[in-house]
Image (tube, coloured by chain):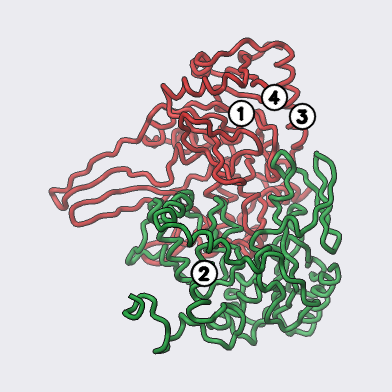
Amino acid sequence: MSDPYRHSILPKTALGGWLARLLDSYRLVGPVADTETVTSYRRLGPEPMLRLSGPRPTVSPKAHLLPQTETLFTFQGSGPALALTAVEPDATPTVVFGIRPCDARALRRLDDVFLERAERDVHYDQRRRATLLVGLACATPGWGCFCTSVGGSPAGTEGLDLLLTDLGDRYHVAVLTPAGETLAAAAEMGDAAPDDIEAARAQHAATAARMPALFDVDAAVRNIRWDAPVWAEIAERCLACGVCSYLCPTCHCFDIQDEATPDGGVRFRCWDTCQFGEFTQMGAGHNPRPTQTERARQRVSHKFKYLVEEFGRAGCTGCGRCVERCPVNIDIRAILRAFAEEGR
Amino acid sequence: MRGLEQAIRDTARELLANGRVRLVLGYREGSVPFRTTPAFIRTPEEVDRLVWNPFCANNLAVYLPAAVGAGGCIAVVAKGCDARSIVTLVQEHQVPRERVVILGVPCTGMADPARLAGADGSLHGTAVTWDGEGTLEVRDAGGGRSVAVRDVLQERCRLCEHNTPTLADEMLGERAPAMPGAAEAFAIVEALAGRPVEERRAYWRAQVERCIRCYACRAACPACYCRTCFMDKTAPRWASKASTADESWMFHAGRAFHLAGRCVECGECERVCPMGIPISALNRMLDREVRERFGYTAGLDPESVPPLGTFRPEDPDPGGSEER
């Protein structure tokens, strides 16, 4: 079987030097410990900060492509003298280091939304083009993880330029793209021995084996219904916070706001979520999603119905953050499994 | 304490069967063995879904105003903290006392699932069973082990001062022993308050910089029942939707002030915060102020008047001329 990519080996002792060289040419982002139990993808400095062990980070990396708050333009004056000034997005070449396969795949889903439609989102586009992804194969699934149930894998390569696999004192490095070759060239890597390649494959298989698919996602997609009683059942418990959406690597809805003084102001966009009551609140007071029931339906249907209809791919990569951090233990895996098993 | 689960079911069954309540708020099995999920029980046939174990973390009082608003009487399975929240809701006229039946559960503290994780930091595939007393049997890829609930308590529970409900219509068990950290409930306040103001400012700025404005703290808080939070008001807009550290600080500080003399330290805000922000330290700071200046502890007596809900000429005036 011929490999679609090149295999290299990076001794762990060479990791620091590689990162230091990358830092000369790129902004680096990677998993950093915020607290003992919270890990976020944060901008890295020259000092060692990475937390590469354990389950995928608490917070997804999407803020680096879709900032929580982003100024689109500023305006000065008013009336005929009104002047608009575009604010160029910060498109500094960036490497997201140690991104998990679910999160890299999630960025491809954001690409669907922001780049594949008739109108490309210029801000997202510029940042996305400037972003390279160095993945880290998951060896430790979190308790809510279900990537294998939605077509992913703990060692999936979709969207990645490199994939690292931790082999103890060294990393196996799969070089997946020409951009990945460029990044790898900055490291003191050697060719992987057959044993290393085998060890990486064995680890991938062992992790995947711990995560059997929990439901038939195609059946779930087929059976999701507008009038299913489960929406009200979820709504009853749901506290209407934004944890699920804001931790989600693919939730991308935003609000647009103007803030002005008499001299001028800014128009910015900021994360928003269908779980908040004001999300679709109209100026005149009407809300087409008046209760949490419609909002529960919206979040699940958007990911597993509307995006599937539009792009042929679900807007969920099974990272499990919503599962683990929901304050009331609403578990989207159970919701999807129930739909999948309907009528069987 | 398996007896407590049976007592909850028996009492719930009776209350539903005789029509005394239309709904029982309790806990049922969660999607994993180290979580439960809130249960809305409406018929006697459903009561056997109710469970009691060291993972009944949610403060169910948060559901009460809406449940009461929908009519009828509601029974609530209430730990010490939940009962104090109900007292506050009654005092503040959000829940008529006669419309709620408090099923008091003497609480020995909730386990923190994160503290049951294996060496790899994950709870993936972890099985947990409770012996009905004080021990959890934990089994994961690393093997099996016995863990005392007392050794893996959620911090809010370790510090709890009123784990046995101070108000109940049906007390379903004997008074529980005091929690191990009850005497240190304000240690975090002492530790922070002793530091220079600039240091404290830097500390809180670093904390709120992580805030992602998901508002889970607000959503999980039974005392945060405003129909429209000041953060969401649009006309006028008090706070920006721009997610900056300044705006997040205004939210957390504003929320803390709104909860002064009302917060019962259930700690739900901190439990649900995905970013690990030590939110309840702010509430404890103001709680200590209220206790010291007004001799008042929130959530103990439904007949008492909360100090910030009234005015007396002899009230202390810390910002006034006397102390300036």
Residue B321 numbered tag? none
> From this viewpoint, which residue is outermost toward the left?
A81
Indicate the chain on which mark 3 is placed. A
For the residues marked 2 and 3, what is the alpha-carbon distance in whole angstroms?
46 Å
Of badges 3 and 4, nearer the viewer stands: 4
Residue A179 vertical position relative to residue B109 in the rendered view, above or below: above
Residue B313, given in percent of the width and then of the height, sits at: 39, 89
**For the residues marked 4 and 2, what is the alpha-carbon distance in whole angstroms?**
48 Å
Residue tagged 1: A136
From the image, tell me which residue sits under label 3. Answer: A206
Name the residue tied to disc 2: B224
- Chain B shade: green
First in residue order: circle 3 vs circle 1: 1
Which residue was labeled with disc 4? A168
Residue drawn at 73 percent across, 46 percent down: B117
| Residue lying at 66% horizontally and 45% vertically, measured from the top left | A222
Q: Is residue B2 left or right of residue B227?
A: right
> Dot 2: within a 10 Å radius of its alpha carbon, few (fewer than 14), some, or many (20 or more) residues?
some
